[in-house]
Structure formats: C-alpha cells, structure tokens
Image: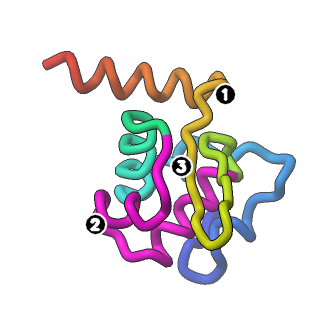
Amino acid sequence: MIEESNTSLLEQFSEDKPIPVEVLFSSRGRIKIIRLLAECGELNISEIARRTQLNHSTTRRHLQLLERAKLVQEKTFGRIRIYRYKIENLRALALRRFIELWEKSE
C-alpha cells in the first residue's frame, strides 16, 4: 500500500522499479507539471512553480518523482535548475501525444 502521509513517495520506490501510473497521476500538481513541460519543453523550477501555482518545495518534490519516472531531466547551471521534458523517453512521448489528443478533441 502507498502511504503518502508517512513517508515521501520517493522513499517508497527504488531507482530500479518503475513508478506505478496510478501514483504518477494521483496528484493534480504533478499532472499540471507534466502538461506544462510537455507543452513548453523546458523551464526553470521557479517558472514551473509560478505557472502551476504551486509553492517551490511542492514543485521540487513533484519534479523529483517525475525525474525518477524518467519523464523529466534536471540540468543545473549554478543555482538555476532547468527541467526538460524527456521526449526521447517512449512513455514521455506517448504521454505528450495523449495530452495533445485530449486537448484537441471535444
């Protein structure tokens, strides 16, 4: 069972095991971040937090989980952290196509 309140999600999943899809989509904040990065490609963490209306620490936790799921990649330039949507990852590509399809159809 997944217990988000007692331990962080990152502590519950090892590096070598994929994060279950229900965990990935269980947070509205993570979905906002996935959608934003799928559309923009890459942004710094402050801009992601601003555009998703999440605080910095919450945004950071979500990004760490998305990085563990191999959907995003962190690049650091001094104190600036840029997060890039990993379009070369098959799951990330499929997810971006799903978002595009969802947005276009009514």
Task: Answer few, some or many: residues within 10 Å of disc 1's Cα (few below 14, many 20 plus, some between 14 and 19).
Answer: few
Label 3 and label 1: CA atoms lie apart by 16 Å
Point out residue 52 in the picture as x, y percentages from the top left corner: 31, 59
Q: Please say whether residue 33 is one of the residues in the magenta stretch.
A: no
- Tag on residue 24? 3
Q: Nearer the viewer, mark 3 or mark 1?
A: 1
The reply to whether discs 3 and 1 touch (Cβ–Cβ < 8 Å) is: no
Element at badge 1? loop
Q: Which image quarter: residue 79?
A: bottom right
In the image, residue 23 sits, relative to residue 79, either above or below, namely above
Farthest right residue?
16
Give the residue type at disc 1. Asn
Judge left or right: residue 105 versus residue 42: left
Going from the N terminus, do you reach mark 3 or mark 1 first? 3
Point out residue 24 in the picture as x, y percentages from the top left corner: 53, 49
Q: Please say whether residue 52 is one of the residues in the magenta stretch.
A: yes
Farthest bottom residue?
6
Farthest left residue?
106
- Tag on residue 89? 1
Judge left or right: residue 88 versus residue 33: right
Look at the image and tell me in which quarter the N terminus lies: bottom right
- Please name the residue that numbered disc 2 is placed on: 53
Query: Mainly helix, strand or loop, the magenta region?
Result: helix
Q: Name the residue: 31% across, 65% down.
A: 50
Element at badge 2? loop
Q: Name the residue: 54% across, 80% down.
A: 5
